[in-house]
Image (cartoon, grey):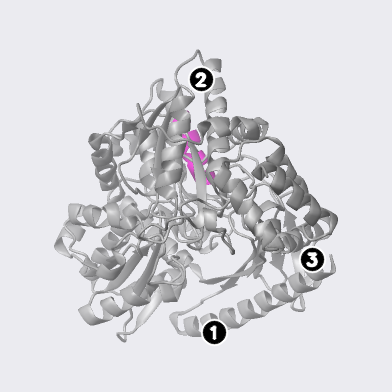
């Protein structure tokens, strides 16, 4: 029997007997009706249905993998795999084919996304007078990352575009820089950041080097949505003829650009900190040690984790915000006598840190702590070095879910603090606007001017960017990159360590001095995961409930103010209106606050809680810390109970 016919028969039978969801059946039927699946894919789906793996079919087809405003992300390896998918495993355990399914990251979704992206870029250029769409492509070390990057490049080239691709895994921030350096119309990086090993993703950047935002985001989403599945089949065979390698000089220029992140080169040269570094099997291994040595540092490497491996074999999850992920690095720090360990995630845009404390033990810093330390150091030293001369025209940019301590730090130095929605694309978008404002005032593109000269002009005619960050371990020091950059973050943190070393102070001393100046702030995040179709429905039901009816109290504490970003008009420090989003921010009567949002990249709901306590004297600091910790636990426990009650009843 013809595989397509057999599969339709099996799917119809499963649907009629109620063994697969109605939506899953419809999406599977749509795929089969357009006749684009190769034999191995049809054989895989037949096998799953014959084996009565109906839950797997539901998970693969309950909804199409959404191409959102920043791209897409999903599983590449099913919970249950078909033999035809597994085929011959690679040396690092990658199956022969990515799992088939409308909701999974696979060749079909990658090809369709690339076709839609190309169509939008072509229309964009035609509206400006024409030109050939140029694309830069990078990938991390995950399962199928090289394959997807080659497929993306092949599709673009077949459509008539010009495409540049790296010779191996590279970090996300390097892709951001390279888009601008090569004058590309767009960029794509194949990565799922710090997600579990079975995930992968497709992240899109526009010509400014930032992740796409309005109006390009909506335009790309529309073109991808209009691309029919039947058109995908012709692009599934990879042909890299005519695809160009990213020039070596572009890679060298990226390393050179990180020099602008260093405020005081002398202090680092005279007080080199002793550091441990681990890329946790990710792309940080490709460049981070080289960048550190470029600045005269001699990192102690966690050799077992320097091997790029999509299985991330030495950790449960390659996320540097987890203590377990840092355990090997911490052990190396303790045995070597190093001052800290720095770890990067699979695509080297996030950085986690553990420090040696005053008493010699190890302490993991939160992303909020790292960002606050860097914000205070950069603001104070830029003022001391006369880089900042008009503080009122300088900015720290952060997300609403990042600690309000950074607002206080900015204001203590006379800087403005600009808050954005969650996602570094909004910070990148701000930098593009600041750059355009300067270009309009000067009458020419100033992006290639020396850093010091641009800093003065930005303060005179626009807004000078001092530092940007988000609580999820992302930091940025200059606007030459338009995304969080771990390669640069390790250098910025090393410089701060050198400065503290010159003063005979520890990181804990510095952090406490910030609290004494600005007040004690503590933050915590709790995430609730819900896998599959049922879990997604539960999350959406909870968000819908909040949108329609705000919470009145949590854990017995009354709400003083509720802000619904989906309905209320909210403006940032630049006077620009914040785009609508299903995001909710609450302030409680005791002065604490919390935010709620669904993750844009994972099947989970996120609760962000913020405590603030006055510190009238250094002696009161420890009491403030204890009070804040107890208060946050109470709020987060209350939020979790609220979710369970509302989500289950919806």
Query: Cα distance, mark 2 to mark 1?
Result: 57 Å
Q: Quadrant of residue 371?
A: bottom left
Q: Position of residue 179 (x, y in %)?
A: 39, 35
User: Mark 2 vs mark 3: which is more N-terminal?
Assistant: 2
Q: Is residue 432 in the magenta section?
A: yes
Q: Which residues are magenta?
A: 425-437
Name the mark on residue 108.
Answer: none
Q: Is residue 183 above or below residue 102?
A: above
User: Is any part of residue 279 visible from this angle?
Assistant: yes
Q: Secondary structure at mark 3?
A: loop
In the image, 133 versus 461, the foreground residue is 133
Q: Secondary structure at mark 1?
A: helix
Q: Position of residue 198 (x, y in %)?
A: 51, 60
Q: Is residue 15 above or below residue 443?
A: below
Q: Position of residue 255 (x, y in %)?
A: 26, 45
On the image, numbered disc 1 is attached to which residue? 626
On the image, numbered disc 2 is attached to which residue? 125
Which quadrant is home to the C terminus? bottom right
Name the mark on residue 551.
Answer: 3
Q: Secondary structure at mark 2?
A: helix
> How dense is the environment of label 3, judged by Cα within 10 Å: few (below 14), some, or many (20 and up)?
some
């Amino acid at each position: 029997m013809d595989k397509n016919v057999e599969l339709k028969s099996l799917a119809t039978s499963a649907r009629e007997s109620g063994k697969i969801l109605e939506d899953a059946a419809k999406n599977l039927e749509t795929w089969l009706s357009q006749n684009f699946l190769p034999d191995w894919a049809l054989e895989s789906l037949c096998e799953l249905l014959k084996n009565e793996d109906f839950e797997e079919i539901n998970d693969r087809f309950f909804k199409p993998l959404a191409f959102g405003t920043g791209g897409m992300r999903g599983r590449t390896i099913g919970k249950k795999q078909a033999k035809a998918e597994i085929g011959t495993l690679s040396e690092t355990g990658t199956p022969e084919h990515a799992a088939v399914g409308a909701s999974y990251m696979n060749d079909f979704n990658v090809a369709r996304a690339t076709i839609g992206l190309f169509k939008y870029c072509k229309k964009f250029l035609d509206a400006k007078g024409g030109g050939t769409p140029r694309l830069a492509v990078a990938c991390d070390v995950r399962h199928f990352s090289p394959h997807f990057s080659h497929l993306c490049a092949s599709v673009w080239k077949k459509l008539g575009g010009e495409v540049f691709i790296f010779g191996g895994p590279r970090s996300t921030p390097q892709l951001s820089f390279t888009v601008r350096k090569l004058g590309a119309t767009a960029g794509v990086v194949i990565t799922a950041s710090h997600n579990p090993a079975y995930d992968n993703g497709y992240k899109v950047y526009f010509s400014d080097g930032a992740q796409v935002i309005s109006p390009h985001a909506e335009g790309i989403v529309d073109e991808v949505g209009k691309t029919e599945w039947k058109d995908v089949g012709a692009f599934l065979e990879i042909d890299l003829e005519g695809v160009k390698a990213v020039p070596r000089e572009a890679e060298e220029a990226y390393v050179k650009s990180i020099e602008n992140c260093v405020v005081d080169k002398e202090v680092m040269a005279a007080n080199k900190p002793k550091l441990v570094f681990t890329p946790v099997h990710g792309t940080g291994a490709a460049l981070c040690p080289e960048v550190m040595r470029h600045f005269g540092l001699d990192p102690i490497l966690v050799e077992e984790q320097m091997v790029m491996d999509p299985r991330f074999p030495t950790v449960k999850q390659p996320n540097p915000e987890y203590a377990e992920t840092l355990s090997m690095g911490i052990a190396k720090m303790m045995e070597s006598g190093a001052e800290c360990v720095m770890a990067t995630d699979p695509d080297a845009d996030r950085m986690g840190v553990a420090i040696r404390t005053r008493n010699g033990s190890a302490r993991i810093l939160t992303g909020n702590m790292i960002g606050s330390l860097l914000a205070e150091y950069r603001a104070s030293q830029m003022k001391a070095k006369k880089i900042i001369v008009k503080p009122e025209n300088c900015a720290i940019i952060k997300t609403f879910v990042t600690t309000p301590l950074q607002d206080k730090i900015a204001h203590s130095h006379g800087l403005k603090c600009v808050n954005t929605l969650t996602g570094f694309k909004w910070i990148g978008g701000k930098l593009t606007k600041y750059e355009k404002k300067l270009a309009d005032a000067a009458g020419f593109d100033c992006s290639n001017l020396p850093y010091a000269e641009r800093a003065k002009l930005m303060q005179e005619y626009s807004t000078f960017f001092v530092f940007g960050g988000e609580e999820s371990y992302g930091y940025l020091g200059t606007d030459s990159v338009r995304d969080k950059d771990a390669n640069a973050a390790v250098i910025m943190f090393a410089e701060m360590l050198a400065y503290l070393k010159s003063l005979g102070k520890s990181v804990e001393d510095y952090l406490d001095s910030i609290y004494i100046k600005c007040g004690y702030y503590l933050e915590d995040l709790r995430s609730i995961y819900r896998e599959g179709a049922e879990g997604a429905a539960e999350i959406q039901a909870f968000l819908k409930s909040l949108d329609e009816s705000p919470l009145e109290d949590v854990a017995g504490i009354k709400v003083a103010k509720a802000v619904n970003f989906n309905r209320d008009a909210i403006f940032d420090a630049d006077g620009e209106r914040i785009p609508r989003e299903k995001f909710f921010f609450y302030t409680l009567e005791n002065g604490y606050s919390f935010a709620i949002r669904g993750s844009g990249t994972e099947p989970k709901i996120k609760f962000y809680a913020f405590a603030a306590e006055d510190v009238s004297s250094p002696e009161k600091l420890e009491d403030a810390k204890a009070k804040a910790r107890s208060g946050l636990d109470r709020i987060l426990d209350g939020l979790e109970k609220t979710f369970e009650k509302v989500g289950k009843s919806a």
